[in-house]
Image: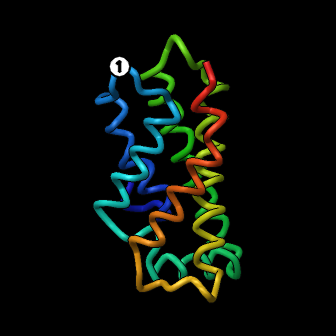
Amino acid sequence: MAGELHPVAAGLVQGRGEVAARGPAERPSDLLRRALREVGQDSDEIVSRHAALRLRLIRTVPAVRGRALQLLMDAQREIARHLRAAFPDELDQVSASALVGAFVGAVIGAVQALLDDPDVPLDNPQHLHDRLRDATDAALRSWAQHR
């Protein structure tokens, strides 16, 4: 399934395997942020020139936009189910879905902003991953303190 997904969603779904390997002190938001870091270590796909082209197509071709949204929503549901299963005493389905939605929104918003900025060099994936991580960490800071 992950091979069909928008690159951001695919990276998050691939990260779902991390749910089973969570540390005892790890919070749900920690797990999501760690999965994103590990996806970034394995691939530059989320912040690549191809990702920029895909975003441009998603913005300009309604059929592509619709399919990307469908796949992203499917991925969010799947990630939320896994997160809920990993933290049954802390999250119900609604709170798991809200956390995953906040996470996905932070990732997509940051990626779009980075790839849209003409002053951001696309030839430095580590810089892009660092900026993405910092933005996502800031967006999820309140969830890290949750419960």
- Measuring from the top left, give residue 63's x and y in whole percent: 66, 73
Q: Secondary structure at mark 1?
A: loop
Q: Quadrant of residue 107?
A: bottom right
Instruction: Classify 10 Å Cα crowding around label 1: few (below 14), some (14-19), many (20 and above).
Output: few
Q: Which corner quadrant holds the C terminus? A: top right
- Measuring from the top left, give residue 18's x and y in whole percent: 33, 37
Q: Is residue 113 left or right of residue 124?
A: right
Nearest the viewer among 139 and 88 is 139
- Measuring from the top left, give residue 61's x and y in whole percent: 68, 80
Would you name the residue on which mark 1 appears? 24
Q: Is residue 3 left or right of residue 143?
A: left
Residue at point 36% right, 49% down?
14
Residue at point 48% right, 29% down?
83
Single out the residue that lies furthest toward the top: 89
Residue at point 49% right, 38% down?
78
Residue at point 41% right, 56% down?
11
- Measuring from the top left, give residue 91's x and y in whole percent: 57, 19
The correct choice, above or below, for 22 with respect to 39 in the image is above
What amino acid type should be assigned to the residue bearing mark 1?
Answer: Pro
Q: Quadrant of residue 10?
A: bottom left
Colouring chosen for the image of the structure: rainbow
Nearest the viewer among 64 and 116 is 116
